[in-house]
Amino acid sequence: MRIELDNSDVLVTGLWINNQAENRSDVFAVFDPYAKSIVQHVADASGDDAVRAVELSSQAFASWKTCFVRERAEILRRWASVILEHQNDLAKILTLESGKVVTEALGEIRHSASMLNWYAESALRMTGEILPSHSNDLRAHTIKQPLGVVACITPWNFPAAAMIVKAGAAIAAGNTCVVKPSDETPLIALALARLATVAGLPANVLNVLPCKSPQAVGEVLCKSDVVRMISFTGSIATGKRLYEQCASTLKRVAFELGGNAPFIVFDDADLERAANAAMNARFYNGGQICVGANRFFVQKHVYAAFIEKLHAKITQLTVGDPFDESTQLGPLINEVSVTRINHLITDATQKGARVITGGDVIDNTFINPALLVDMTADMNAYQQEIFGPVVCVYAFDSEDEVIQLANDTQAGLAAYVFSQDYSRLTRLSESIDAGAIGANSTALFSQDIPFGGIKQSGIGKEQGIHSLEEFIDTKAICLGL
């Protein structure tokens, strides 16, 4: 490791089962995307490991589901506190394995702790209802109960936050969890599980199975009758495969899948505000974010002016070592991602797009932040999620036209609209097929705001009280007097 940790205890390289690390002879390497060096070798879970982890989690559920909700909440609060105590080391681990700039990594860790505190408070408010009776000698009410074992499959781009959003909510609701982190970023998931144990989470309430090839572990999690739910964040294609595998057991699913977010700028928008928001919506985490603005639709009257503002801001971005405080964009996660984005740029330019700035590849590690204009719908970047530091700008004439363009995708995760006409903002917010709309804003993430896609961008919600509802059964009880 090229960075020293203050407390090496948070670095776990084995499977995390039964509140302890289990080493294996089979290991895989976790790489630093910037230095192209090995950070650590991590134990590689097998299908048999998954079967055992599920069984142990099922056994733990018998007692965890009866744990008083206030006691669960107190454990979550202690977990949040311990995370904050080790936030600097956790941010270092996250930056090392993901390439995320360390300031953003630190923000993710703090957000994760905040989410745990929010779940601790909200779990106390998951109450049943007294219902109108349909007979004088009956009384009807509902109670909310946890599902059982929940499998959480988390991504590499926000590996800490995704684990807490999923497993934290599931555990708060009284479930036990088996987490399969991305093979790109398993160390932060293992570190968080280690700190959950320090906070007093009972054995096997949270087990973590890092693995290089997810097929064997994923198949166990999807096809097991014991696993009652799969919560997954990833690509639409992978989500569809998991959905098929879950069909035989009819288990509940919550999928947060890919996006193709439109970012719409009308000619009456505050262009400076829109340009600043565009920078955040495209370049946060190097553009490796599912709600990142993918297609920038700018009304023709302000097309040139908006591009000029973006150009000036993009050329000021600093690319480099994610541990350098002056760096604003770190490396892409791997060379495959670099190659894929380079192909999207090449395809666009061959079909008539112009590169105003950036787009060149540096050491198979970075894509210089790019601005492409004169984009058209026949280019691959129009339908494919870019997931990198590239702004693609399209021109439009009318409101009706841009609504059609915005909805011309099977994805429906997020959308952004900028205008000073609030009637127009209302119309667009209701007309665009997306689960989350930013109207003169890109601030879609808050503990209280539900997040999730429509169409092929997913099923279910994360964050907000709606996320806890995903992990419970509501049972109706009719009591005869």
Image (cartoon, rainbow, N blue to C red):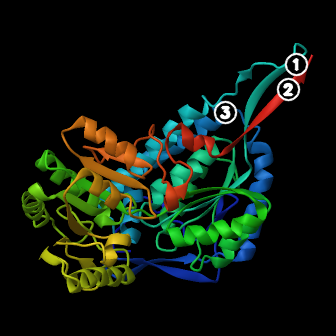
Labels in figure, total: 3
User: Are the two marked residues, 3 and 2, in contact with CB atoms closer than 8 angstroms?
Assistant: no
* Observer-nearest of 361 and 72: 361
Where residue 69 is drawn, which disc sits there?
3
Q: Earlier in the sequence, mark 2 or mark 1?
A: 1
Residue sitting at x 27%, y 44%: 441
| Residue 209 sits in quarter | bottom right
* Observer-nearest of 165 and 449: 449
**Would you say residue 100 is visible in this rendering?**
yes
| Amino acid of disc 2 | Cys
Q: Earlier in the sequence, mark 1 or mark 3?
A: 3
Q: Secondary structure at mark 2?
A: strand
Q: Is residue 62 left or right of residue 372?
A: right
Q: Is residue 84 left or right of residue 236?
A: left
Where residue 138 is drawn, which disc sits there?
1
**Would you say residue 445 is visible in this rendering?**
no
User: Residue 43: percent from the left, percent from the top?
Assistant: 60, 76
Q: Is residue 321 above or below residue 145?
A: below
| Amino acid of disc 1 | Leu
Q: Is residue 399 above or below residue 174?
A: below
| Residue 401 sits in quarter | bottom left
State the residue position of label 2.
478
